[in-house]
Image (cartoon, rainbow, N blue to C red):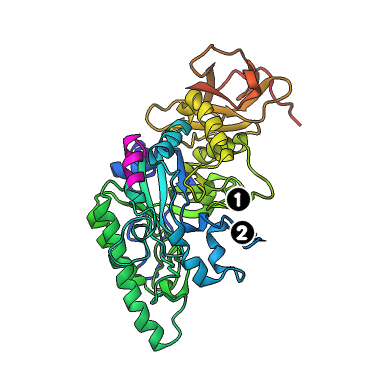
Amino acid sequence: MTLFRKILILILAGSILPASAQVAKRSSVTLQHGAHRLGRRTDPAMARWRAYGLGQFLHWGVYAIPGGHWKGKYYAGAAEWIRSWPEMPKEEYDNLYKQFNPTGFDARAWARQAKEMGARYVIITTKHHDGFCLWPSKYTSYTVAHSPYQKDVIGALTDAYKAEGIDVYLYFSIIDWNHPGYRASLNTPADRQAYEGFKTFTRNQLLELLERYPACKGLWFDGTWDKAWVEQAAFADSLETELRSKIPGLVIGSRFRADENGKRHFDSNGDLIGDYEQGWERKIPDNIQQLNGNDWDCVMTIPENQWGYHSDWKGHVKTSTELLEMMVKCNAMEGNFVLNFGPDGNGKIREEETRLAREIGDWMKTNSEAVYNCGYAGLEKQDWGYFTRNRQTGKIYLTIFNRPVNGKVRVRLPAGRQLRTVRELKGATLKTEEIRKQEYFIELKIPAGNIPQVLEMELSEGSSSGKEEEAKT
């Protein structure tokens, strides 16, 4: 490979990626509404998105009032879906907004907690599938302005997070159970006529959000799987272009629209629609090859599947160490990690979430250097944890989650790379031992509290001495 081609690949990828990830998937299918770009965006706004490392998701709305219960009955699903439960009378749910008066809500406290956790961006639910708007939309009366609270929640959160230096992204559900024109599928001419009004309403609300909150960096869409919306390839494509024209650099993921053949996330040629892949909800890829060179993020819940506030967390609840490992695993494969919080009906973030945010923040205060603007290091994944590499400085970090019982981490390097030094992050140089060609032991100093440990590694070009050659057979 020529030097020119190597440089070109680095520019297109934005980081060191496997050679197999650079191959575009474009085939011969002619599309009007498929992907409009091959490869990664290379503009400053997308580079900023790529560097976040850790984000926060906020799911909040009137569904926090029942909190997964209704008249003594327990709802086992995700709390924000309770309106779809047969045990929840629709009319009674639709009147819960008359009780929405979260006197404990403090946007600045939420933002400070996110800052202390180490989040660099936040995704805020402007409205969920129930259609209740947390901003005073002029296109519906089903908004916070007509609740007892009356104040603009989205405005308060946008201002508070911006003041803490955290970028704001707005979540918007295309599904709207409250709007008379909404349909999940279009089966009759009357359905289609009603849906035209719903499309106009949706466009108006999205433009309204960008006009009211111009500090918004991107839109995060949900509820786009309905057959009715999937059919709107031309409309959605045109609307996306219009939205992008309102805010330069606006970031929109792969969930917003389908192509004319109904393909979502990836078009009929296999090319990514949008700026980054959004298929990794509550799951993480096994390896970087699965990502085909695309930008991506993982949005993760603390319990197994609760986004909005549910008063009962049943089943497994993730620990801070588990969440930190998920984050670094995502970073090591060029992705961001976004942790969800579901405040209660009074506007308070629950105690368990507060504790986890504090524990993650304590770790990030010391170790965030291995997270922010870090991605794939070009090295083989090893059992003890993950390598990350800073895209700007080129520094390589080892984050150790599975510490060997002998206190020594084994590192295997590819041919042509040699271990020069390893040091604790902002600390002492560690003793290393070359045990065979391209393979080393690093002798650890176990940190207090047995927390995940970060080391900085410096490599040099050339082969190691190979003290112990493999026996020839």
Q: Main secondary structure of the magenta part?
A: helix
Q: CA distance from mark 2 to mark 1?
A: 8 Å
Amino acid type at mark 1 = Ser
Residue farthest along the right direction in this orientation: 473
Q: In the image shown, does 281 or 32 lie closer to the viewer?
A: 281
Residue 93: x and y in percent read 51, 66
- Residue 418 position by quadrant: top right
Residue drawn where x is 33% and y is 45% of the image: 156
Residue farthest along the bottom direction in this orientation: 189
**CB contact under 8 Å: marks 2 and 1:** yes
The stretch in magenta equals 156-166
Residue 133: x and y in percent read 38, 59
Residue that badge 1 annotates = 311
Q: Is residue 72 magenta?
A: no
Q: Quadrant of the N terminus?
A: top left
Amino acid type at mark 2 = His
Q: In the image shown, does 345 or 451 lie closer to the viewer?
A: 345
Which of the marked residues, 2 or 1, is nearer the chain's N terminus?
2
